[in-house]
Amino acid sequence: MPRTLRSTRTSKKRFSSLRPRLGPSVNWSFIRKSVARCEESHSGLCRGSGKGVSGRPARVVDVHNNCVVNLSPHDDYVTLSYVWGQGVMTEGVATATNTSISSLQEPGSLSSSRHVLPKTIRDAMVVCRKIGFRYLWVDSLCIIQDDPEDLREQIALMCDIYSGSYLTIIAADGDHADVGLPGVLDGPMRDS
């Protein structure tokens, strides 16, 4: 089962040891150390990464090159669980379609002005960079939304995609994709 990086201000439920560290500011050093501690102490018990999972995503976001890429069978990836919401994922907001997928695969395309990303996705890309992960799976960018075959195949694999990820970032605040992750880009940053 993958670890969960959950962002919430209101829930008192315990989802992971990382949850209390998100809020007005993020302690990136604590999160990196927690991930390393999990890897060192019990990686065999809860190791995601899809090595033993039958389905892996076809595509992921490369957060270093800011583009969508095909995922190799040996690469770890992080998943994002968030709410699209009403009216946020509209024309002008980057989503994978038959028309847009080739431009989304160009290095730098997700950091250019031609592809607008909701704040939650931008913040999740920052989280991945800060804690040392290169690949992020986001449904709107990694499933071709107007391709019935890709939709059917990738949606059928979603349980495996989430359970095979190294960890899942859960955006629990807000009711749309432009809310963001508290403390990532809108608050003070801490390295210690």
Image (spheres, rainbow, N blue to C red):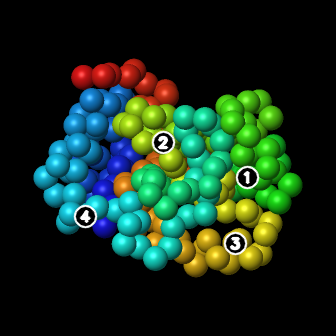
Q: Earlier in the sequence, mark 2 or mark 4?
A: 4
Q: Position of residue 7 (x, y in %)?
A: 39, 46
Classify mark 1: helix, strand or loop: loop
Amino acid under label 4? Cys
Image quadrant occupied by the N terminus: bottom left
- Give left or right: position of 24 versus 60: left
Amino acid under label 1? Thr
| Neighbours of disc 1 within 10 Å: few (<14), some (14-19), many (20+) | many
Classify mark 3: helix, strand or loop: helix
Residue for badge 2: 134
Q: Position of residue 183 (x, y in %)?
A: 41, 31
Task: For marks 3 and 2, give the CA distance.
Answer: 24 Å
The residue sitting at 49% across, 28% down in the picture is 185
Residue for badge 4: 46
Residue 85 shows in the view: no
Image quarter of residue 96: bottom right
- Give left or right: position of 187 versus 116: left
The residue sitting at 37% across, 37% down in the picture is 131
Which residue is at the far right? 99
Classify mark 2: helix, strand or loop: loop
Task: For marks 4 and 1, give the CA distance.
Answer: 31 Å
